[in-house]
Image: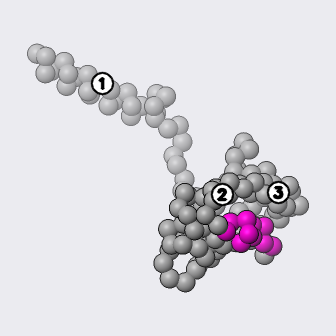
């Protein structure tokens, strides 16, 4: 009898979670973002965020596209991943906004850089330091 009660409770919980009107079930289906390196800002969230890690071999640039207000003031926040030897640059729409001097060295990196956005933007991260070193970034308006 005890096994039937437990089995019955499991069935009731499963049915309750599958009911679209319960708070545990999503009200709408999830739609994947068509641009894998971009984030759409909703309610003041980041315009774009990402991570760049230096691999072995020649340095490779990673590009991140996003939309924003044309001529809008924004902030680029950059933080290292804790591996010493980070070096490189970050450009926004062809303009270098984070230089070698800002990323170079073995100290921790925690930058906040004021930038101006266009309606369509390309942020390019090119790391040239020690393999395994890297950073995370986000642009907010």
In the image, residue 91 lies at what x, y percent?
74, 71
Which of the two residues, 69 or 13, is positioned nearer the viewer here? 69
Q: CA distance from mark 2 to mark 1?
A: 51 Å
Q: Kindly identify which residue carries mark 1.
A: 12
- In front: label 2 or label 3: 2
Mark number, residue 114:
3
Q: Residue at x 63, y 59 (%)?
A: 107
The quarter of the displayed image where residue 88 is located: bottom right
Q: Residue furthest top?
A: 1
Q: Which residues are magenta?
A: 95-104
Q: CA distance from mark 2 to mark 3?
A: 16 Å
State the SS at label 2: loop
In the image, residue 102 lies at what x, y percent?
73, 65
Q: Kindly identify which residue carries mark 2.
A: 109
In the image, residue 81 lies at what x, y percent?
55, 58
Q: CA distance from mark 1 to mark 3?
A: 54 Å
Q: Residue at x 72, y 56 (%)?
A: 111
State which tag comes first along the sequence, 1 or 3.
1
Q: Is residue 51 left or right of residue 117?
A: left
Q: Is residue 66 above or below residue 45?
A: below
- In front: label 1 or label 3: 3
Q: Is residue 9 above or below residue 98?
A: above
Q: Residue furthest front?
A: 106
Q: Is residue 125 visible?
A: no
């Amino acid at each position: 009898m005890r096994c039937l009660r437990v089995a019955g409770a499991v069935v009731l919980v499963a049915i309750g979670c599958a009911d679209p009107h319960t708070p545990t079930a999503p009200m709408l289906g999830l739609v994947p973002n068509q641009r894998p390196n971009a984030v759409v800002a909703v309610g003041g969230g980041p315009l774009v965020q990402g991570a760049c890690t230096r691999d072995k071999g020649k340095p490779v640039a990673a590009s991140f596209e996003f939309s924003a207000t044309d001529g809008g003031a924004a902030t680029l926040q950059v933080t290292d991943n804790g591996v010493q030897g980070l070096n490189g640059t970050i450009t926004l729409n062809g303009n270098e906004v984070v230089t070698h001097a800002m990323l170079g060295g073995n100290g921790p990196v925690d930058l906040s850089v004021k930038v101006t956005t266009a309606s369509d933007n390309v942020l390019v991260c090119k790391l040239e330091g020690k393999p395994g070193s890297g950073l995370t970034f986000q642009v907010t308006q």
